[in-house]
Image (spheres, helix red, strand yellow):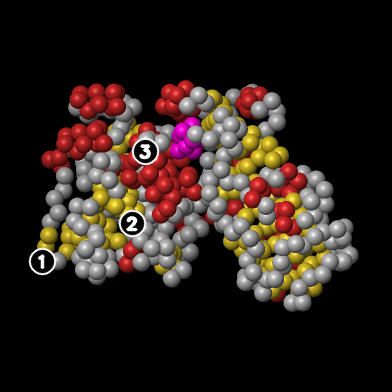
Amino acid sequence: MSYENKVWYYYGKGIDSFGKNGEPEKEDIQNPGPNEVLARVDALALCASDNKMINMGNDFPLFNHRDFEKNPLVLGHELSLTVEKAGRNLEKHWKKGMRMGIQPDVYMNNIRYCIGVHVPGGMQHYILLKKSVFHSDHGATAFEVNDDLSYSSVAQLEPNACVEAAYRPWGRKHFNKKGTLLIYVGKQGDAGYIYDELLDHEEVILWSEGEIINQYPENTVRVHSLKEAKELSPMGFSDVLIVGNAKQDVLENVIQSMKDTAVFCWLSDGETNQQVRIDIAQVHYGKINWLGSKTKKLSDAFQRSRQRYELKQDGNLLIMGGAGAMGRMHVMRALMQENGPQTIVVTARSNERLEALKKDFQEIAVKKQKRLEVVATNEADWKEKLSNYTNSQGFDDVVVSAPGIDPVEKAVSFLKKDGMLILFSGTKHGSFVKIPLGYIPSYGARLNASSGSSVEDEKSVLRKQLEHQIDLDKNVMAVAGFNYMKEAIKAVNEGRFPGKIIVYPHLDNLPLIDLRNPEGLPDSLKETLKNCGWGKQAENELFQYYKSQLINVKKET
């Protein structure tokens, strides 16, 4: 038995290769195997990452030179699903009609099976969830959700979980004893430095440009250059310890030689405001923990107080490029966080999106007794405006929620010396920006990042939604049906909507509708939108209005 399916394939060469002759394709999808589940795709939230993949093709970091002609991709990873049929080993739990949320970033036996990237995603009527989803290295990544939730809110669990993940520990908090440690000692030597944390890695490489006084492990290998060190550890360093002050080129070259899961620890010689060019992609897509101290005592660098991830209570927050879909999620989280920042300032290139954000969230800000301000960076005095919000002291927290070099370059100058900088948006590898790395050992600054999320992050967002701590549907700006998928993707690429576009695959002929100006919808639904906004009620009315266009499942033997 098989099911008739409709699918949008991506063939790897930009938007023109999305679909076959610009249209979705029909094909059969097989019954699930013993450890698989066939699910109906109820809603799909379009993500900027989908656009990155379409626009970048094989330049996208996770595609690994994929041959799209032979192996086209079904995109879509922000999903709301309903069980259609479960395999015999899963049918006791996953019953037909059960609502599902899903964490798409799946690992099984340390192999990545990310839905919508490595394996087929949700830009289809039905999706076959493989064994890896239910037997991943972290357990099942699919979970049951409440029937009272809108399809659109469930589809937005994943992007909001990515925001949630930005404020929790992402990398290791300690050295990896099973890896390779590179120790660099500057020209000042290591006199006065206290190693009260064991340096008992399987491999220890010591590169010193100064006098050595301290004792190092017996397995330590001395080298005279970074080139020699890299020859001993060609796969990269698991951890790095910088002792004393290092020149900019030394720091930059060492950082580029680290593994993406490294701990970077810098014990500086007094205060330093050293600027270092760092690859944004290395920070964003990796899980590096950036630590340091000026006390010359190793354990001080690892203190809990120097490993902050959450926004500062009663502090001030700058969200650079924060008026888009993901930035708005950061804004909502900060506004509704009981112990969060008191002042939230959001920037964008122009006022249009900022005005929409202020309109949508000002009521929450007033209710929570917080200050929400917006600044357009195309205005001549935008830097002065930002400085005035902190009396030129800098922001306690700075989140960069727009891709590319320019937003990061604009943001770093407004970071308080002991503040936290979060590089939330990714970009291609080789995008270097100067970061005041010296703030980390000197003042306890934090450099954090996030890419993706876990199933627990999604469940955390789900709990917040059920407890009315957030309103996921407040970010929905437009809706569309399956046949209008390509138009909806173009709208994301053009930035036509500041929030999310939700695609309902089983409303094939629903055109792309701007919910702020909902032409073509019945008056009753317009009234619901006016009074209640988008949500379960509006969604039900939309489905009822288009019910004649719903596609019934066709079973074939």
**Which mark sits nearer the N-terminus, 3 or 2?**
2
Residue position for label 1: 557
Q: Is residue 259 shown in magenta?
A: no
Instruction: Single out the mark in the foreground, 2 or 1.
Output: 2
Distance from disc 1 to disc 3, alpha carbons, whole Å, reads 45 Å
Q: Which mark is residue 161?
A: none
Q: Which residue is mark 3?
A: 467
Q: Amino acid at mark 3?
A: Glu
Q: Residue 43 at x, y = what percent?
A: 29, 46
How many tags in the picture? 3
Q: Is residue 184 left or right of residue 281?
A: right
Determine whether 55 is above or below 388 in the image: below
User: What is the magenta range?
Assistant: 329-337
Q: Main secondary structure of the magenta part?
A: helix
Residue 521 falls in image quadrant: top left
x and y, in percent, of residue 373 in the image: 54, 25
Is 335 inside the magenta-drawn segment?
yes
Image quarter where the C terminus lies is bottom left
The part of the image, by quadrant, that contains residue 231 is: bottom right
- Depth check: give the residue in front, 327 or 154: 154
Residue lying at 39% horizontally and 49% vertically, measured from the top left: 459
Name the quadrant of the N terminus: bottom left
- Secondary structure of the residue carrying numbered label 1: loop
Res 331 visible? no
Q: Position of residue 330 (x, y in %)?
A: 49, 38
Give amino acid for label 2.
Answer: Ala
Q: Secondary structure at mark 3?
A: loop
SS class, disc 2: strand
Q: Which residue is mark 2?
A: 142
The image quarter containing residue 522 is: top left
Three-letter code for the amino acid on which mark 1 is drawn: Thr
